[in-house]
Image (cartoon, rainbow, N blue to C red):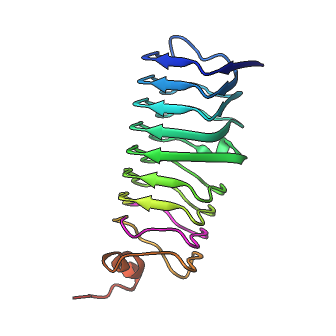
């Protein structure tokens, strides 16, 4: 397995030019296309992805430690196939629609200005995570640990208070409707 450090990858289509399996440390990926690429046996440490398309990329025991995704398209990704021991990522202005974090430990994760339609957070540990200006339309929260999570500026979420752990989670007054949706009540 090779080790690659501090390298810049720019405007590369990795379907045409496959990324060599190995450890990538402090590398930057700008406007690269990873869509539908098999990323098995590739680990990312302190890497930055900007303006990349990783839609439908395939993960298998990948390590993602201190990875930043900014302005990326991450549609249909199954993060649950990543190694969650060192999994620390930040998402800024990303599209994560139809992705899954099923049963992952993603404590203290920052989701900033992200579109997150129909994301699966079933049995996920999101404690102390932040959802800043995120659209969570249709996302699933079931047996999810949301303790101390911050939803104050998030919107379009539906969270069942009885099926999730939400102690000390933060919500705005406007967001209360997303917590009471299942009761089919009118609030004026």
Residue at 71%, 46% in the rendered image: 86
- Which quarter of the figure is the C terminus placed in? bottom left
Number of callouts in the render? Answer: 0
- Which quarter of the figure is the N terminus placed in? top right
Horizontally, residue 179 falls left or right of residue 104, namely left
- Camera-nearest residue between 63 and 139: 63
Q: Is 71 placed above or below 98 here?
A: above
- Camera-nearest residue between 82 and 5: 5
Magenta stretch: residue 117 in it?
no
Horizontally, residue 13 falls left or right of residue 155, namely right
> Is residue 139 at all visible to an observer of this figure?
no
Q: Quadrant of residue 89?
A: top right
For the magenta stretch, what is the residue range?
Answer: 138-153
Magenta stretch: residue 146 in it?
yes
The image position of residue 150, as x and y in percent, is 47, 68
Q: Is 5 placed above or below 83 here?
A: above
> Is residue 143 at all visible to an observer of this figure?
yes
The image position of residue 18, as x and y in percent, is 58, 15
Q: Is 188 placed above or below 141 here?
A: below
Q: Give the farthest residue toward the right.
A: 1
Residue at 36%, 52% in the rendered image: 113
Horizontally, residue 88 falls left or right of residue 92, namely right
What type of secondary structure mainly makes up the magenta span? loop
Q: Give the farthest residue toward the top.
A: 17
Q: Is 137 placed above or below 45 here?
A: below
Residue at 42%, 78% in the rendered image: 179
The image position of residue 174, as x and y in percent, is 30, 77
The image position of residue 81, as x and y in percent, is 66, 42
Residue at 54%, 11% in the rendered image: 17
């Amino acid at each position: 397995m090779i080790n690659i450090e501090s390298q810049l990858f720019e405007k590369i289509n990795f379907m045409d030019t496959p990324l060599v399996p190995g450890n990538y440390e402090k590398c930057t990926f700008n406007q690269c296309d990873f869509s539908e690429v098999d990323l098995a046996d590739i680990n990312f440490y302190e890497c930055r992805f900007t303006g990349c398309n990783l839609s439908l990329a395939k993960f298998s025991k990948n390590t993602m430690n201190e990875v930043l995704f900014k302005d990326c398209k991450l549609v249909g990704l199954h993060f649950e196939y990543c190694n969650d021991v060192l999994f620390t990522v930040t998402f800024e202005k990303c599209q994560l629609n139809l992705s899954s974090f099923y049963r992952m430990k993603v404590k203290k994760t920052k989701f900033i200005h992200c579109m997150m339609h129909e994301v699966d957070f079933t049995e996920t540990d999101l404690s102390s995570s932040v959802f800043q200006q995120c659209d969570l339309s249709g996302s699933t929260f079931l047996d999810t640990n949301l303790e101390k999570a911050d939803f104050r500026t998030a919107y379009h979420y539906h969270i069942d208070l009885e099926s999730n752990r939400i102690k000390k989670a933060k919500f705005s007054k406007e967001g209360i409707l997303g917590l009471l949706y299942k009761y089919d009540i009118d609030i004026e």
